[in-house]
Image: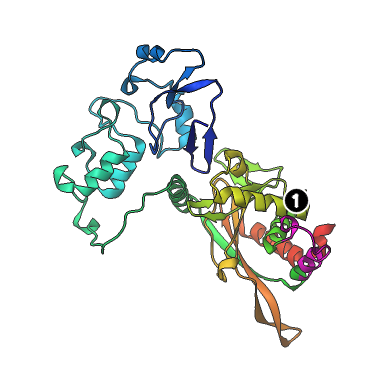
Amino acid sequence: MLAEIETDKATMEVESVDEGRMGRILVGAGTAGVAVNTPIALLVLEGESPSVLDSVPAPDSVVAAKMPEAVVANALGPDLAPEKDTGGRVFATPLARRLAREMHLDLAAICGSGPRGRIVKADVEHAERTPQSVGVHPVSSLDAVVEPPYERVPHTTIRTIVARRTLQSSREIPHFTLTVDFAMDALLALRKQLNALNEARPDEVRLSINDLLIKACALALRTVPEINVRFTEEAMHRYTQINLAVLINTPGGLVVPVVREADRVGLADISGTMKALARKAHAGKLQPEDCQGGTFTLSNLGMLGVRQFSAIINPPQACILAVGVVEPRPVVREGALAIATMMTGTLSVDHRAVDGAAGARYLTALKQRIEHPLTMLL
């Protein structure tokens, strides 16, 4: 293995495809904002002399093989797209520009330490620590914040991307929410019965409430397919697969691995898949394909005691379901007060793609699956 590369959703190991040894490192460990197709190291192949590197340009003059700008901009998004080298422009990496905006720093007053004097992340962070030496100034007096003593914790790549995507979602997507209470007694009884079929079975195939909710959400999407969509300016994309994305909280931030075709696979397969994805997520070993292709997202904070919440839609999807704690509550049944095990679910919907009536039909279908779970076996 040569290196670990952290993307917005996963950490990937890069292995050598040739025999040999590392001859020269071009991009040091911990470097942020490395462009696609940038050389990161040079290999001395088996049988070659280290002197072959003498004819290779120095690291600061290595020119990456550039992809078309439209392709790079589309892949990275507007905030991370590369800058054009125009006259009079201050040369800085996209990450350095964003940090400077957040810290209200003047890029023109910062001395760059990157190749050809380009300003990098470390230069901006150094400028924040020594503002008087680089002419730092707040944008306005209203921006000045007096903070108590604090410890600076650098953002992980995942945290940065989560911040950008949630801001984009709340700014660009017109959200509305629908809330329903689900009676969970029958679902819990079925789970207990299935897990008791073989007490000696390993934990890998023991069902959780979340496993059953994934299945119920997927089957309800099959009943109301107009929820399983994406809005674009040209047309509505109605997905022909039902891929459930499930939010998992890790030390580095939120990740959203996907259970593919969750309406077609069995509960034991869903349970095993989710446990495997959770282990990979907490180890930072999720691959990009583990998090791609989701059509609907489930967010569950019930294990943390949260009763009800509204989640931000995970673009480009149109809906996300937020569920809370499963707990006994007083309810009225046939005119009499009773105790039932209940759970509250809130569906956040992109109003550009889905109308309120369609959202309500989906929650009705989901309620039917949860309160009559034997229908999931049909």
Residue at horizontal 66%, vertical 52%? 274
Is 1 drawn above or below residue 147 in the view shown? Answer: above
**What residue is shown with label 1?**
269
Q: Is residue 313 left or right of residue 118?
A: right
Q: Is residue 341 above or below residue 143?
A: below
Task: Check if residue 198 falls in the magenta segment.
Answer: yes
Local secondary structure at mark 1: helix
x then y, percent, for residue 260: 69, 45
Question: How far across and down, in percent of the image, does residue 220 sit?
Answer: 73, 56
Colour setting? rainbow
Q: Callout 1, which amino acid?
A: Asp
Query: Splitting the image into 4 quarters, where does residue 230 fall?
Result: top right
Residue 224 in sight: no
Could you say where residue 133 lies in the image, as x and y percent from the top left? 14, 43
Examine the rendered structure and indicate whether residue 41 appears above or below residue 93.
Answer: above
* Picture residue at 39% right of the left edge, 49% below the top: 155
The residue located at (53%, 42%) in the rendering is: 10
Residue 351 lies left or right of residue 144; in this view the side is right
Viewed as shown, does residue 10 lie left or right of 221? left
Quadrant of the rendering where the C terminus is positioned? bottom right
103 falls in the magenta region = no
Q: Is residue 89 visible?
A: yes
Front residue of 369 and 114: 114
Mark 1 packing: few (<14 Cα in 10 Å), some, or many (20+)?
Answer: some
> Which is nearer the eye, 66 or 143?
66
Residue range of the region highlighted in magenta in the rendering = 189-207
The image position of residue 46, as x and y in percent, is 51, 16
